[in-house]
Image (cartoon, rainbow, N blue to C red):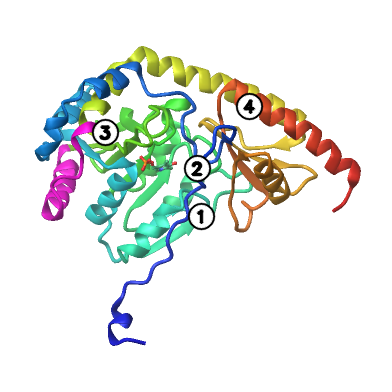
Amino acid sequence: MKAWEKNIRRVVPYVPGDQPAGDRLIKLNTNENPYPPAPGVRRALGEMDYDRLRKYPDPAASVLTECLAGYYGVDKNQVFVGVGSDDVLAMAFLTFFNSEKPILFPDISYSFYKVWAELFRIPYEMTALDEAFLICPEDYYRENGGVIFPNPNAPTGLLLGLEQVEDILKHNQDVIVIVDEAYIDFGGRSALALLNRYENLLVVQTFSKARSMAGMRIGFAIGASGLIKAMNDVKYSYNSYTMNMPSLVLGEEAVRDETYFRETVGKIVNTREQAKKRLRLLGFSFPDSMSNFIFAKHEKVPAVRIFQALKDQQIYVRHFAGPRVEDYLRITIGTDEEMEVLYDFLEGYLRGEISGKCF
Ligand SMILES: *Cc1c(COP(=O)(O)O)cnc(C)c1O
């Protein structure tokens, strides 16, 4: 072993869902939107002045920040934008979670919370979801160094009502509470409604899911101006130019087209409700998702077997290892056509597996 090797930071990297290539495959494994971004995004991409790439982008990301502020009816100094919400969340961890006390988040949740806590050496404790996979607000009544949870939660898809979100806030006014609303547009009421009453609340959202722009990497946080200033100070202290110029221009276009946004989100919600019926008929049970995915368990056939059978058909879904979750598949809602292919295959496959009784 070389002397310097002992000084290398060792972390266990997060393993994202596969990004397989091919035309025939059906990709329901990483909660991307099955519809393209708004037409204005394509237009702006075509008209983009490539000579502008020569120059540094606006470090304050003003056009996008102001556009989001207008859309959500807040002041521009209440908005922070970053390179996907992963970047925004990591920046929030660095900025706000500096207590000796542990931060709290659900044990079954977005796996990056644990990754960032370990990376930034933040003490943490995970609170257990109940038997129905619900977050229990009472678990967040104890002393802590901060709170973060997704709403709707991932990978369960379950939504916490605004009253319960507020209950968590009420009991945690001495720390920052981050609500990660990556999936809020698919059915929930945003905690943005509570912003006026809780200056310790930070709401984080993304363009990756409901706005069909996972490849562009845009996320944002909205909170009291003091919180946003603190995040900007941390950002400017080590990297001013996080947002590239195309993201700023194209992100603004995506926000402008409200009609297209409503339409595609509406289609996904309809397909999701249809999927609940179809999957139930096929013998699956699942928490009642308010997101763009369903976390489903089959009553007879183990999840890993179904996962592999689907993969062999080039139908990709997500399977997580670990207690309680390993019986489930997380199935992203695709187009109606993609979902029909999924149901068709599952129907034949599950009938064969169950009559074969090989397990
Ligand atoms: C997808 C997701 C994110 C991150 O999205 P970005 O692509 O980095 O914007 C954050 N939190 C949750 C719960 C997610 O599902």
Q: How many marks?
A: 4
The residues bearing labels 2 and 3 have C-alpha atoms spaced at a distance of: 26 Å
Q: Of 195 and 203, which appears nearest the observer?
A: 203
- Above or below, comparing residue 202 to residue 340 in the picture: below
Q: Of 43 and 14, which appears nearest the observer?
A: 43
The residues bearing labels 2 and 4 have C-alpha atoms spaced at a distance of: 20 Å
The residues bearing labels 3 and 4 have C-alpha atoms spaced at a distance of: 42 Å
Q: Earlier in the sequence, mark 2 or mark 3?
A: 2
**Ligand 1 location (quadrant):** top left
Q: Which residue is mark 3?
A: 197
Question: Is residue 304 highlighted in magenta?
Answer: no
Single out the residue that lies furthest toward the top: 259
Numbered disc in front, either 3 or 4? 4
Tell me which amino acid carries mark 2: Ala
Circle 2: element type? loop
Look at the numbered disc 1 and say if its residue's Cβ is closer than 8 Å to ligand 1.
no
Q: Which residue is mark 1?
A: 107
Could you say which disc has been placed on residue 157 in the image?
A: none
Q: Residue at x 42, y 24 (%)?
A: 36
Circle 3: element type? loop
Tell me which amino acid carries mark 3: Arg
Q: Residue at x 51, y 55 (%)?
A: 107
Q: Of 108 and 213, which appears nearest the observer?
A: 213
Could you say which disc has been placed on residue 339 in the image?
A: 4
Q: Earlier in the sequence, mark 2 or mark 1?
A: 1
What span is in magenta?
Answer: 225-246
Q: Of 127 and 182, which appears nearest the observer?
A: 182
Q: Which residue is mark 2?
A: 154
Badge 2: residue crowd in 10 Å (few <14, some 14–19, many ≥20): many
In this orientation, does residue 187 appear?
no
